[in-house]
Amino acid sequence: MFEALTQRFGEVFQNLRGRGKITEANVAEAMRMVRTALLEADVHVQVVRKFCDEVQAKAIGAQVISSLKPDQVLVKIVHDELVSLMGPVDPRIPFVTPGPTVILMAGLQGSGKTTTCGKLAKYIMARGKRPLLVAADLKRPAAIDQLEVIGGQVGAPVYTERGHANPVKVCRNSIFEARKTDRDVVILDTAGRLAIDEELMTEIAQIEQATTPHQVYLVIDAMTGQDAVNTARHFNERLELDGLILTKFDSDTRGGAALSAKTITGKPIKYIGVGEKLEALEEFHAERIAGRILGMGDIVSLVEKAQQQYDAQEAEKLQKKMASGLNLEDFLGQLKKMKSMGSMKDLMKMIPGLSTQMPDMEVDDSEMDRYEAIIHSMTPGERRDPSIIEASRRRRIAAGSGTDPKDVSSLIKSFAQVRDMMKVMSGMSMLDRMRSVGQIAKMAAGGIIPRIKAGSTFKKRRETQKDKRKRRKKHRR
């Protein structure tokens, strides 16, 4: 979401490198660039003005100690202000005892509210709760059917009253049903509209009065930019919102809603939707998002994603296999786990040092499916010992996977490089291992998963080499 903003901030800090100290002139110049970057990212003008004034006031006259440089000092100031802009946020849901805890979900039509209800149900089920989904959207055709399908996918029951036309009574009855069936959380999926109107706001206000929910969340589409913030402001005037949920956070939008929502509405962003899968709901942490915006990566979120896929026993087994040497059967299992963690491009953005290089990289996640097909076309013996794969075997594997023999050779060669690096890493301390993460990621991205096509950096380097050859020819003449 923040690629363009990250690139612009990088240019700002690049201009400060090499300066001896922070002065009023170079801070003013940097703030002009920051102001332009934020406005281009569709951040509310009021938020931009406040943010730039705060950064400028703290930056002018800031002491640059010998171990730091002016650009590093400004990065720290901007990071702290971004955190202050978006936070603090407590993503935990205050569950009540005795239950049920009632959560009212509001939002416009098309914001992804019904899907988010299913994601939230799955999220709280992973924390030992027993949610009941309530189909209170009686206006939109097939809304009830959609919620029943989602409920079946996450394993949560759905309360419906298909013959009823009053959503207030449906919501009230659902709470009695939750008590009868021992459900400790009730998630109300209310109706949306294509735009805010009085009928919608009156209906939701009546549901709130009848059910007295413990939490009221507004689901807004991050792709709508300033419209999302305006929607949140209107809802907040009629409802006592407890937080916001931003959907489509993995899109290529400019990120203005995420940076403006807290300041304009006074309500924190609690969760973000980062994909279409029902597992793709993350807690919102201002510190981590600020790190992503400034190109620092987000190693904490990356570790949390990994922990969801690996328990302690699996991690210990993987550690032993790394020491002895992984084979392609092990790699196939890890490949499937990595795919469930999200797209490779999003994962690479979380690695410090790689996030700033992403604009020059084109990552194709479909390559992962190709490599899976190649490994599945191998015999068990070939997966355990890829060194036995010679020309005739490569042709057979390529024919079975619908690929080229060169692709098979590339996979085997790149896998051997990463395997050897992992052997070395298995004996490192945790600190040294973290320092090697970026190097391994680059190696993996360059050959195994996924293939990265050369970007503008490579093209410029190739053109320079051509120029050198031309100059040598002229010199010889």
Image (cartoon, rainbow, N blue to C red):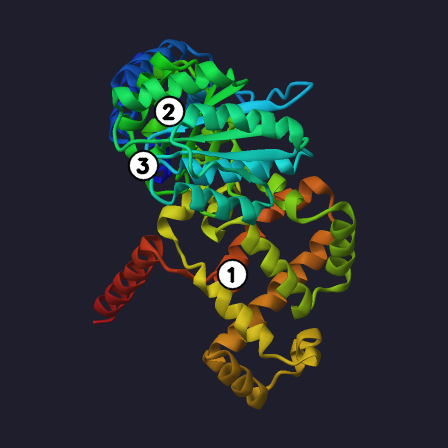
Q: Quadrant of residue 33?
A: top left
* Vertical arrangement, residue 313 with respect to residue 118, above or below: below
At 69% from the left and 18% from the top, the residue drawn is: 97
* Vertical arrangement, residue 103 with respect to residue 428, above or below: above
Residue 446: x %, y % from top left: 48, 61
10 Å crowding of disc 3: few (<14), some (14-19), many (20+) = many
Q: Which residue is mark 1?
A: 449
Q: How far apart are the alpha carbons under marks 3 and 2? A: 13 Å
Q: How far apart are the alpha carbons under marks 3 and 1? A: 29 Å
Kind of residue indicated by mark 2: Leu
At 27% from the left and 24% from the top, the residue drawn is: 196
SS at mark 3? helix
At 61% from the left and 65% from the top, the residue drawn is: 417
Furthest-front residue in view? 163
Q: Earlier in the sequence, mark 1 or mark 2?
A: 2
Pick the residue in front: 295 or 29: 295
Q: Can I make out residue 419 in this image?
A: yes
Residue 207: x %, y % from top left: 43, 20
Q: Which residue is mark 3?
A: 223
SS at mark 1? loop
Q: Which residue is mark 2?
A: 259
Pick the residue in front: 44 or 388: 44
Kind of residue indicated by mark 3: Met
Residue 289: x %, y % from top left: 47, 30
Quadrant of the rendering where the N terminus is positioned? top left
Residue 460: x %, y % from top left: 30, 55
